[in-house]
Structure formats: C-alpha cells, structure tokens
Image (spheres, rainbow, N blue to C red):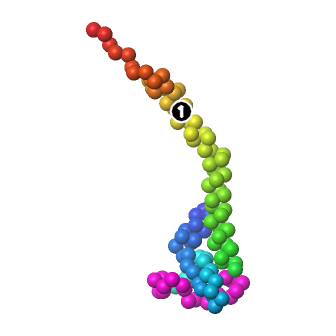
Amino acid sequence: MTTVVFLTNTTINQHMHKLSSGLVIKHSHPFDNKSTGEPFQKHNHTSAEFIFLDQLSNTVFWIYLYILFLIYLLFGHEIKTRSHVIIFGNPDLYFLKNYHAPPTQAY
C-alpha cells in the first residue's frame, strides 16, 4: 500500500524548480496547484529539502523498476511456460502441437 501511495504522489504531484544557478530540480510532494500551467513552481524550499525531495523522487522510480525486473526474473519464465502447458496438456488441443490438420471423415 505504501508503494502505491508513493507512486501516486510521484505521478500526480511531480513538479520542477529552477534554482538561481540554473539547475533544475524535479521532485514530488503535495503543493498549491494554482500555478500548474507554469513550467517551474514558485513555492520555497531550503537547499536540504531540494536535495532530499529530488533524491526521494528518483529513488522511488528506481526501486519501482528494480521490483518490476525482479518480478520478471522470478516469474517471467513461469508465465511463458504455463501457457504451453495449458495448450499442450489438453488432449483436445493436441493438433496445435502436432502441426497437422485434423483427420477428415470418410463417407
């Protein structure tokens, strides 16, 4: 549940700030949505908040990709082979494995 809340926050509340040095910081947290049409938001953060929020936003993204990769490694092969077991284990679908047309009925 925590992951879903983090991903929802990252998706809905993501915005950018342009620092005086020209560096653009992207992060997400709930904020006043009055200026959502502007490319950079104007609310204030300390330098420590900028760094923390930027790293947190990027960390959540990389953790999400890592989890998806682990799921693929752990269950990807099983998902691929399970469909073959369903098709080839069913005697009614044997012709799919045999690659021959079904026999015709002679009258």
Q: Secondary structure at mark 1?
A: helix
Q: Which residues are magenta?
A: 34-50
- Front one among 48 and 31: 48
- Front one among 90 and 37: 37
User: Is residue 48 in the magenta section?
Assistant: yes
| 59 relative position to 100: left or right | right
Instruction: Answer above or below: position of 7 versus 74.
Output: below
- Front one among 85 and 95: 95
Question: Can residue 30 be seen here?
Answer: no
Q: Residue at x 62, y 63 (%)?
A: 3
Q: Residue at x 64, y 83 (%)?
A: 23
Residue 65 image-quadrant placement = bottom right
Image quarter of the N terminus: bottom right
Q: Position of residue 39 (x, y in %)?
A: 51, 83
User: Is residue 60 in the magenta section?
Assistant: no
* Residue found at the far top of this picture: 107
Q: Position of residue 47 (x, y in %)?
A: 70, 86
Image quarter of the C terminus: top left
Q: Residue at x 62, y 48 (%)?
A: 72
Q: Position of residue 2 (x, y in %)?
A: 62, 65
Q: Residue at x 63, y 50 (%)?
A: 71
Question: Can residue 85 be seen here?
Answer: yes
In the picture of the structure, the residue carrying the numbered disc 1 is 84
Helix, strand or loop for the magenta stretch, by majority: loop
Residue 50 image-quadrant placement = bottom right
* Residue found at the far left of this picture: 107
